[in-house]
Amino acid sequence: MGWSGLRWRRYMALALSLLLAGPVFVGTGGRVGAVPAADESARQWLETVSTNMGQPGRVFRAQLTIRERGQAGEVTSRGTVWIDAEQRKSRIEVRRDSNDPILVTVVDNWDVATFDAILNKANTVTVAEDQRANVRNPAYSVLTPSLIAAYQAGQINPDQDVTTTLGEQLGGRDVVKLALTLQVSREVPVPPPPDQQGGQQQAQPRTETVTFTHEYTLYIDSARGLPVQESVRTLDASGKEVGVRTVTFDDIALLDRAELPPDLLSTQAVQRMVASIDQQLERARRIGFPLFWLGRELPRAFTDAKGQRQPGLVLNDVQVFDQPNMPRQVVLIYGTRDEPTIPYVILAQQPRSDWENMVQQLPTLRWLQAEGVQRRPVQVPAGGEGTLYILQPPPLASSGRSGGGNQTPQLPPLLLVQINVGDAVAVITTPWVPNSEGRQANPFVDPTQIAALAGALARLN
């Protein structure tokens, strides 16, 4: 699951942070400084656009085109946003290559619910009371990152921070341009020197300051007083462009609230969007390449990380990555019924070409090609050619204070079973699960146990 998370999170830059859980422009722990240059009309225009979007009894709706350009390339998404400023509610849906949303965020006053369709996960948080003081209206937060959202969150002072340019043209329309330049500094951890990595006794963790410049721009229709386009351009400390995000507003309408479905702006409706395991399994069967599984339950007793005896492994999560024009993958996650969010066994399956690309690109998989890796054949009665990869990490540096002789602490082995079947690859991994003392306590982190899991596989499709 680790590599799939890395791969797919790269595409979730649109996730429109849960806002209000931290500053609109930067997460908690950063320092923000506006480049001083402003004029008196910026506040007036921000008030105008907010008021026109938030007319009493009306819901602002717009179709969005979201373009993001970064070092990994350019991604274009489509979206729809609804803002009911009077009732302090809003919703945004983001789509890629189909009509099904990949991300939904709903704000209902101080509650924020999100649904990630790629991971099939929903989450709801309530904004803490100490973060509400300066917020004018939380409904606008779904536009984040945005000058409008920042103004409504009380995080910028337009009189001091924002500049206004009149008489601009954009797409054949007369527009007003608002601009804000921010310098954001954050403390990031610095990896320890190679001779300290893995040691029990390490020096105090070091950090370094990283500074970025963010150039925010908002274009407002001069005649209608409604947003036309927003963008943010990010530069590193050397002035090199890191990324650009542009949102264009089209098909703007102010709808009568009574026209909307009653649960459109409901956080409960977001929670109901999560598919069941049976629905995900049916979706997985249509993925287009061979799949294995261990059943809904594998009756193989084991002792969990809390020292409790479990009758067997339980299928707790099924993740299906089948978005158009994206790498395909199915991930089955097994654990206990008591703690369904803790993975003990992960079975990830994808086309062989995608797996080979992952091995080359992801640092977490490079150990498969390291010196000292053992390779053993594994029997897979369900079909396919299985190989067990084993790498024993070097011993940890001893602290010399244990009083238990000269015993050297030893990390558990790195294990992975790869099963080749046709043009697909299935991979079994068993993550380290710490016990109350911080020691690895997943009984399946064992060459014999993980090989036995391969022997217990059955075909899913």
Image (cartoon, rainbow, N blue to C red):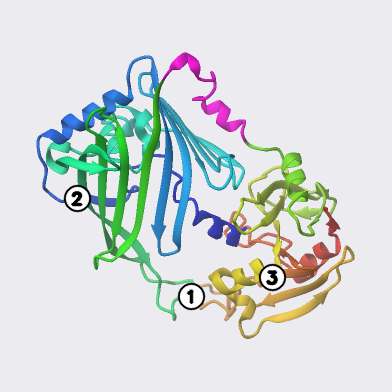
**Dot 1, how many residues are within 10 Å of its Cα: few (below 14), some (14-19), or many (20+)?**
some
Place of residue 198 in the rendered image (x, y in percent of width and height, measured from the top left)? 50, 73
Residue 264 inside the magenta-drawn segment: yes
Q: Earlier in the sequence, mark 3 or mark 1?
A: 1
Residue 238 inside the magenta-drawn segment: no
Residue under label 1: 399
On the rendered structure, is 50 left or right of 393? left
The answer to the question of whether label 3 and label 2 lie on touching residues, with beta carbons closer than 8 A, is: no
Q: Is residue 319 above or below residue 239?
A: above
Q: Earlier in the sequence, mark 1 or mark 2?
A: 2
Q: Is residue 264 visible?
A: yes
Q: CA distance from mark 1 to mark 2?
A: 44 Å
Place of residue 373 in the rendered image (x, y in percent of width and height, measured from the top left)? 67, 81
Residue under label 2: 33
Q: Earlier in the sequence, mark 3 or mark 2?
A: 2
Which segment is the magenta one?
255-273
Residue under label 3: 415
Place of residue 178 in the rendered image (x, y in percent of width and height, measured from the top left)? 20, 41
**Dot 3, how many residues are within 10 Å of its Cα: few (below 14), some (14-19), or many (20+)?**
many
- Where's the N terminus, which quadrant? bottom right
Q: Is residue 361 above or below residue 25?
A: below
Residue 288: quarter of image: bottom right
On the rendered structure, is 407 left or right of 386? left
Q: Dot 1 lies on which element?
A: loop
Q: Nearer the viewer, residue 117 or 74?
A: 74
Tag in front: 1 or 2: 2
User: What's under tag 3, amino acid-wise?
Assistant: Leu
Q: Is residue 25 visible?
A: no
